[in-house]
Amino acid sequence: MKRKERERTARYELILNTALELAAAEGWEAVTTRRLAALIEYSQPVLYSHFKSKPEIMAAIAMRGFEKLATELKKAAGSPNPLHTVCTAYLRFAASQPVVYEAMFVSPTELLFADEKTPTALRAAFDALVTALGPDQEAPVFTAEVVWSALHGMVILMQSERLPVDSARDRLDVLVRRFSGSC
């Protein structure tokens, strides 16, 4: 039984890695269950035994992204200037993982935000931002949502080349000053 479990886990990883590679090369639109099945050299029913749909594949990739983002943001929250460091870590993550970021925040999935069913990893990433705002923040959850929204807007506008990437630090400094009074 352990061999079958290892094989199943290996297939699961192969599906996710192949989906990421294909999305990085051609965009998420190119990722279809038929195309993935052909690339991994398994039948579609085998693929469907792991994931029922493309949104499920994207949700699995997104969850891994949230786990990594949460780890990076929690680590950054312990710095002397936590809000700036957390926001910088967020922007760095988005820039280094654009395909994963798209699965996390742009493409439709069934992952819920700001809900009792919000996954733990997503909650942990958000909580790191709330913590970075500091204990004196009025309406910390809503303030964190506004900061997160601003960061997300910056990411999307830079990825689409509507804002120059080389000014990202200046924009970030303005954002942090507005919410922490320092930079």
Image (cartoon, helix red, strand yellow):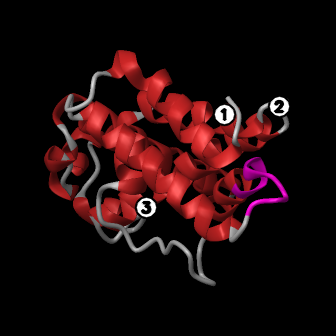
The residue tagged 2 is 79
Span shown in magenta: 130-137
Cα–Cα gap, marks 1 and 3: 28 Å
- Residue type at mark 3 is Ala
Name the quarter where the C terminus is drawn. Answer: top right
Mark whose residue sits in front, 3 or 2: 2
Residue at image point 19% right, 39% down? 27
The residue tagged 3 is 59
Tag 1 near tag 3, CB within 8 Å: no
Percent of width and height locating residue 86: 67, 38
The residue tagged 1 is 84
Cα–Cα gap, marks 1 and 2: 9 Å
Cα–Cα gap, marks 3 and 2: 31 Å
Percent of width and height locating residue 29: 15, 49
Name the quarter where the N terminus is drawn. Answer: bottom right
Asked if residue 5 is positioned above or below residue 120 in the image, the reply reads above
Asked if residue 93 is positioned above or below residue 3 in the image, the reply reads above
Percent of width and height locating residue 52: 33, 71
Label 2 CA crowd tier, 10 Å (few <14, some 14–19, many 20+) = few
Residue at image point 68% right, 71% down? 139
Tag 1 near tag 2, CB within 8 Å: no
Residue 134 inside the magenta-drawn segment: yes
Residue 25 inside the magenta-drawn segment: no
